[in-house]
Amino acid sequence: MDQIKVVIIGAGKRASEGYIPTIQTLSDRFHLAAIHDIDPDRAAAAGAQFDIPSYSNLEEMFSNVTADFAIIAVPALEIHQATMDTAEFDLHLLVETPISIDLASADQIARIAKIHNVKLEIAETYYRRPHERIKQLMIQEDVFGKINLAYCRFVGKGYHAASILRSYIGFDIPPVHVWGHQQDFQVQPHTQFPNATDKTDTECWQHGVIEFRDGRRAVYDFTTLSYGSPLRWHRSKATTEIYGEKGMCVGLEPMILNGDSKTHPIVIRRQETVIADVNVLEAYVAETKPKIVWENPFREYPLTDSQVALALCLTNLENAIRNDTDLEYGFLNARTDREIDLAIGASADNNGIGIEIL
């Protein structure tokens, strides 16, 4: 099987710590043809570090390099323009989150992808993480019955949380209303990130409630200190909660009722191996009858769980290109999750008034 040729737009941490190591590990499937950054020095540094051609001019890069798809891995404020510019070269696109700053810009991206007849996938990894996959599989197997309510606490902001919550309720169930609240609080001054010089002395808590067309609901909590802050160290135990007709699941601790109306915990076992000093997930096994197993499709590669989620994004687009199949997540789901995110903020800015999702 020929390698899929890939270029990366953006030479920041998303590329250097995420995409490049993952692609190079999957070198039997992908070839990293080049990297681009508008900062010539940053582009050159990434090229030298990873031994790949680097460019700071798109036209120059595509006059020298052929590729099947481009990864847009730039900061959020730059995603729209970088995607619009790259689409002009008729490449399929894997775009980082969020899809865009606002919905109008997101719709422009969808239109140009359609004009150039290219596939547009969004690199939403949160709901693709292995520990989420086993829960989704248990939901599909009706372990919990119909999911009535889902919580996402502290796990990921806005659109990330929306993707997780909708993976429980069902991506095919439309959200219809959103309510939001947010409030600032004073905290002990501290450096939020390891290399930061300025100190943080405030945090903003945001809460959201999502109502779906069939009456089910999802609840979201997040703080601006969730990422990096030692004050909110307990984020390492951040969790999701699923409440269904026949049981519930808090984090990776499921429970259902047995025939005697007694609590029946279900053990989820993690099976691992070690490859090149990396603890590689082989499978998650839920001890149901029969057992429910989510096997890591990349268990023969030295990839961490986070890299597995990224690899699922890459190979989803790869399969869609090779076989002309539908994308797993795609633009419409990304747009819906971004709309929920923006609606929570809009509701919070308007004293919690409900926002209709169209």
Image: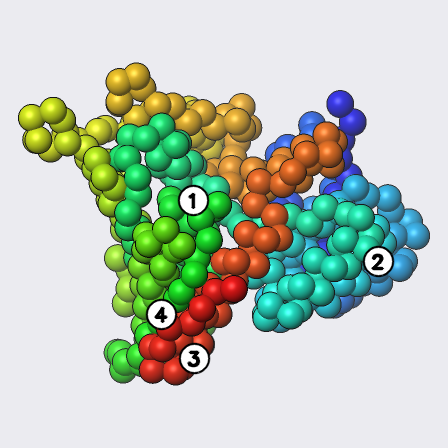
Q: Where is residue 101 in the image (x, y as percent from the top left)?
A: 59, 70
- Locate residue 246 relative to residue 216 in the image: left or right: left
Tell which of 294 and 58 is nearer to you: 294
Q: Mark 3 points at which residue?
A: 198
Which of label 4 and label 3 is nearer to you? Answer: 4
In the rendered image, the residue lying farthest to the right is: 63
State how far apart marks 1 and 3 are (Cα): 42 Å
220 w.r.t. 181: above or below: above
197 w.r.t. 64: above or below: below
State how far apart marks 2 and 1 are (Cα): 34 Å
Which label was assigned to residue 9? none
The structure residue drawn at horizontal position 28% and vertical position 64%, both measured from the top left corner, is: 232
Q: Position of residue 249 (x, y in %)?
A: 25, 41
Inspect the image, locate mark 1, and give the three-letter code of the amino acid beneath it: Gly
Inspect the image, locate mark 4, and give the three-letter code of the amino acid beneath it: Trp
Answer yes or no: do the residues labelled 1 and 3 have beta carbons within 8 Å? no
The structure residue drawn at horizontal position 30% and vertical position 43%, both measured from the top left corner, is: 147
In the rendered image, the residue lying farthest to the top is: 290
State how far apart marks 1 and 4 are (Cα): 20 Å
Q: Name the residue under label 1.
A: 170
Q: Where is residue 113 in the image (x, y as percent from the top left)?
A: 75, 54
The disc, 2 or 1, on the residue closer to the chain's N-terminal end is 2
Which of label 2 and label 1 is nearer to you? Answer: 1
Answer yes or no: do the residues labelled 1 and 4 have beta carbons within 8 Å? no
Q: Name the residue under label 2.
A: 88
> Could you classify mark 2 by the number of other residues whose Cα lies within 10 Å: few (under 14), some (14-19), or many (20 or more)?
few
> Tag 2, which secondary structure?
loop
Inspect the image, locate mark 2, and give the three-letter code of the amino acid beneath it: Glu
Which of label 2 and label 3 is nearer to you? Answer: 2
State how far apart marks 2 and 3 are (Cα): 40 Å
Figure quadrant of residue 134: top left
State how far apart marks 2 and 4 are (Cα): 38 Å
